[in-house]
């Protein structure tokens, strides 16, 4: 006996798929908040001997994972033939940006103690900070224009603007690679996944691009075009 699943509608995605996805994406940040609660209460915690550095690395890594996941929603939805799953892309993207904000906040507040001059010097002198801030600068307008109202207001410009997610993700991968240093495997894994997703996007854009009309032959009375 073959079980047939009910058709995946927008309503079913919003009602049954989005809530558990929200919960799953929230778990890392909830866990981090719990560890800080334990640490501040003087209880055993999982933040290690350097909670500031742990928090910064932890949130940055999850931000990168969610950003890559947001880019993968489209190909996965099309590959499975479940176009309604595209409704999860904005959700995942906003969680990625939330993690980016926590990541940046931990750097500004815990690492640099709001020393803005020192932060500026860091941005200018330290390569991985430069790439990270550049990625944040590209992601910020995407988060601010993520609403349906902004999409309607911007029209076609909205689509062009949100293509900035690709260079932002690339900058995030470079930021991570410069941060970990040495011959580390993990940055190359994310770089490979991102390269595959960018390649998929490029093929999709090429397939959807209107083809140039073929030159028509002008048939003269003599039969051949001049």
Image: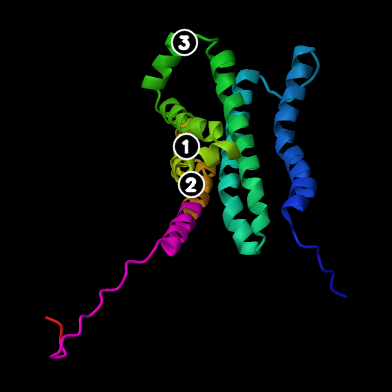
Q: Earlier in the sequence, mark 3 or mark 2?
A: 3
What crowding class fits label 2: few (fewer than 14 Cα within 10 Å), some (14-19), or many (20 or more)? some
Query: Against 10, is 67 above or below?
Result: above
Asked if labels 1 and 3 touch by Cβ distance under 8 angstroms, the answer is: no
Most distant residue in the bottom direction: 222
Q: Position of residue 25 (x, y in %)?
A: 70, 38
Q: Residue at x 73, y 23 (%)?
A: 33
Residue on which the image places disc 3: 116
Q: Considering depth in this image, is 157 or 123 the residue closer to the camera?
A: 157
Residue on which the image places disc 2: 191
Q: Position of residue 142 (x, y in %)?
A: 52, 35
Q: Residue 47 appears in which quarter of the rendering?
A: top right
Q: Is residue 84 magenta?
A: no
Q: Residue at x 20, y 85 (%)?
A: 219
Query: Against 27, is 41 above or below?
Result: above
Image depth: mark 1 or mark 2 in front: 2
Q: Position of residue 67 (x, y in %)?
A: 57, 41
What crowding class fits label 3: few (fewer than 14 Cα within 10 Å), some (14-19), or many (20 or more)? few
Q: Earlier in the sequence, mark 1 or mark 2?
A: 1
Instruction: Tell me the SS state at disc 1.
Output: helix
Q: Is residue 191 shown to the viewer in this render?
A: yes
Magenta extent = 197-223
Q: Residue at x 74, y 58 (%)?
A: 8
Q: Position of residue 149 (x, y in %)?
A: 58, 37
Instruction: Tell me the SS state at disc 3.
Output: helix
Image depth: mark 3 or mark 1 in front: 3
Residue 201 relative to residue 29: left or right: left
What crowding class fits label 1: few (fewer than 14 Cα within 10 Å), some (14-19), or many (20 or more)? many
Q: Earlier in the sequence, mark 3 or mark 1?
A: 3
């Amino acid at each position: 006996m073959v079980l047939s699943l009910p058709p995946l509608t927008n309503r079913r995605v919003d009602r049954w798929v989005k809530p558990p996805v929200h919960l799953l994406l929230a778990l890392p940040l909830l866990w981090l908040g719990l560890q800080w609660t334990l640490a501040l209460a003087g209880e055993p915690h999982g933040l290690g001997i350097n909670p500031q550095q742990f928090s910064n690395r932890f949130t940055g890594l999850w931000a990168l994972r969610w950003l890559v996941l947001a880019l993968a929603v489209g190909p996965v939805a099309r590959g499975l033939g479940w176009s309604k799953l595209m409704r999860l892309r904005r959700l995942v993207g906003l969680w990625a940006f939330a993690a980016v904000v926590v990541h940046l906040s931990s750097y500004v507040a815990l690492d640099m103690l709001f020393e803005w001059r020192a932060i500026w010097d860091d941005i200018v002198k330290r390569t991985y900070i430069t790439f990270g801030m550049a990625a944040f600068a590209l992601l910020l307008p995407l988060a601010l224009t993520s609403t349906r109202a902004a999409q309607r207001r911007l029209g076609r410009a909205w689509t062009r603007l949100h293509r900035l997610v690709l260079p932002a993700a690339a900058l995030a991968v470079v930021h991570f690679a410069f941060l970990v240093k040495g011959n580390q495997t993990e940055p190359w894994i994310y770089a490979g996944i991102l390269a595959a997703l960018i390649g998929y996007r490029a093929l999709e854009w090429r397939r959807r691009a209107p083809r140039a009309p073929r030159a028509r032959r002008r048939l003269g009375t003599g039969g051949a075009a001049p």
